[in-house]
Image: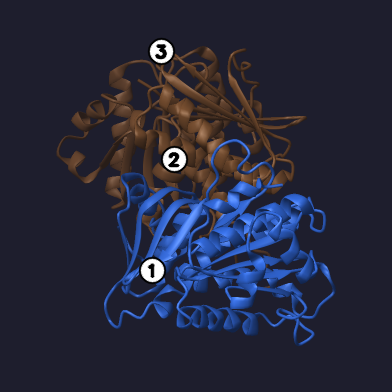
Chain colours: A blue, B brown
Amino acid sequence: MADPTTVDALSLGDHVCWTFDDHERHLEALARFVRAGLAQDQKVLYLTDTFLPAAFLAAVETYGVDADDARRSGRLVVSTADESYLARGAFDPEQALRGWTTAVEEARRQGYAGLRVAADMGWTVRPIPGIDRLAWYEAQANRIFSQGEALALCCYDRRLFTARELERVGMAHPGTAQADAGSGDEWRPLLRMRRTSTGLSLSGEADMTNRDALATVLRHLVEDVPTGNDPVVVDVSGLTFADLGAARALASAVTSSGGRMRLEGSGPFLVDLLAFLDQPDEEAATADGRVA
Amino acid sequence: MSAGASPALPEADPFEHIGLLYSAPGDYAEGCAAFARRGLEAGDPVLVAVPGGNGSLIRERLGDRAAEVRFADMAVAGRNPGRIIPRVLLDFARRNAGRRVWIIGEPIWPGRSAVEYPACAAHEALINAAFAGRDAAILCPYDTTGLDPDAVRDSHRTHPIMSDGTASWESPDYTDPAEAAALFDRPLPPPPPGAHREGFASLTDLAPLRASLARHAGAAGLAPKRVAEVLMAVNELAANAVEHTGSGGTLTVWAEPGALVCQIDDTGHIRDPLAGRVPPERSHERGHGLVLVNELADLVRWHDHAGGTTTRLYVTRP
């Protein structure tokens, strides 16, 4: 499982698929997660599927977190998946996404520096109506978290999911922490997506592991960024690696924006790669007889 | 093909692929210029893609008409033989869609190394599959005095028509493209004992794999942009291995004099002999990945064996 210290690397805007296979280390990670949130004046929400809420609060106290005080003041909320995602009996992804937007707004209104969420996802293996849309939901959630006012740690118990299932759901997250993440080199989310006043800033690496997260944010960026008629700018200067799929997602978002979106800060390699992708389509060229 | 009741005769394939055997520079220039003139006289677009100074021999012979011909240096554009079909031949055909194209393509010259040659010969074989049914004529000059006799012999297998500049004939040794390409799928010399080996099993292994490859590529003296290109190419191959075999594979990296070599071994098999040579329709990412690998590497050797596929990339280093 990912090392508990990996959660220390999270910052507002992150949305991470975090895997565990050991309750004690999961608890340790959550204690670190809660402590860091309280120290940064964030509102902390934990949706548990692993512990009884009261038992969790008592257990994190043993890690030196004043959980009881935080809970009474409303800075820490511990609830269960059944009371949150499944309050209506089925999983309704649209409802859940609206719930996150409301929760982020509420935390802001209450004066917190942001919202920090840890969510156990073990409940998703149960035969629940709507659960087939989990990966869609996780990808869409990036549109909310990338706004930079909230961060989410989605905790997947490796014992409940196949490697293939984890790979698929991982692709909907900009970062995944699994196997021995954080036990050797310092870990951080592979990709960071942050909304800016004019669009989006990307940093880190975009590859197959975060393909759906990036594609979803890019696909909806023009509708999500209120720039009026000003161009929507995707700052890629911090992108240290983009695989072919990521470059295609960037190129396709620019093309389908009808001139509204542009990239800023492309390195020489990304420029070449985008040119490679921009070769005329053979069928299209035949159809209109275009000669370059 | 006619849809009527009468039995339709099979339409003749408009594609011609001719091996031109020559032994003297004058014969080379005249054989190539005659082919180019046929294209020009038909009002068709002509491309001459030959190595280094050979272009000027043809240019001189064409005189004023050379201005109507497009020239490319095959030693650059076709340095990696796997790049020639997608980025030289099909690219020219695409830019001139709806017209017959005439191309002089010289992928094999005396300076080609033993490690390059099988990739060159496989390329010649696969032109026949990639261009089947296309309105194109491609002439490939073979230097019968400068080249290894085996290379000249192989040209009879990969070209349905042979010519010596005065006469042309159907090659009796011509071999089905996929079969011929398989003949040139030769085992590779093993990596040196000190090579760095690193397994990968899942997509989350790709980022650490790239990080260690970046260190090796940097240590081999590659410029930062070239390192980025190597990471891209190897990442595509490794991601394909994870996706299509389910069990990942192994990356082996080492530096040779003049080249950084990266090898991916996986347990899968590539079924389509044109993979990486004919760009698929835009929506198919995998095929584009292999075309990109051919675009970025200085040489790609593929070897299909009982245990899977070995893909070896050579990247020139200072």
Question: At which x and y percent is residue A252?
Answer: 44, 65
Q: Which residue is mark 3?
A: B146
Quadrant in the rendering for residue A259: bottom left
Within 10 angstroms of label 2, few (less than 14), some, or many (20 or more) residues?
many
- Secondary element at tag 3: loop
The residue that disc 2 covers is B295
Give the vertical position of A65 relative to B80 (above or below): below
Q: Which mark is residue A255?
A: 1
Type of residue at label 1?
Thr
* Type of amino acid at the residue the image marks with label 2: Glu
Please, which chain is the residue tagged with disc 2 on?
B
Q: Nearer the viewer, mark 2 or mark 1?
A: 1
How far from the left and from the top, in percent, is residue B308? 73, 33
| Location of residue A77 in the rendering, given as x and y in whole percent from the top left corner | 65, 74
Quarter of the image where the N terminus of chain B is located: bottom right
Check the residue under mark 1 and report the chain it is in: A
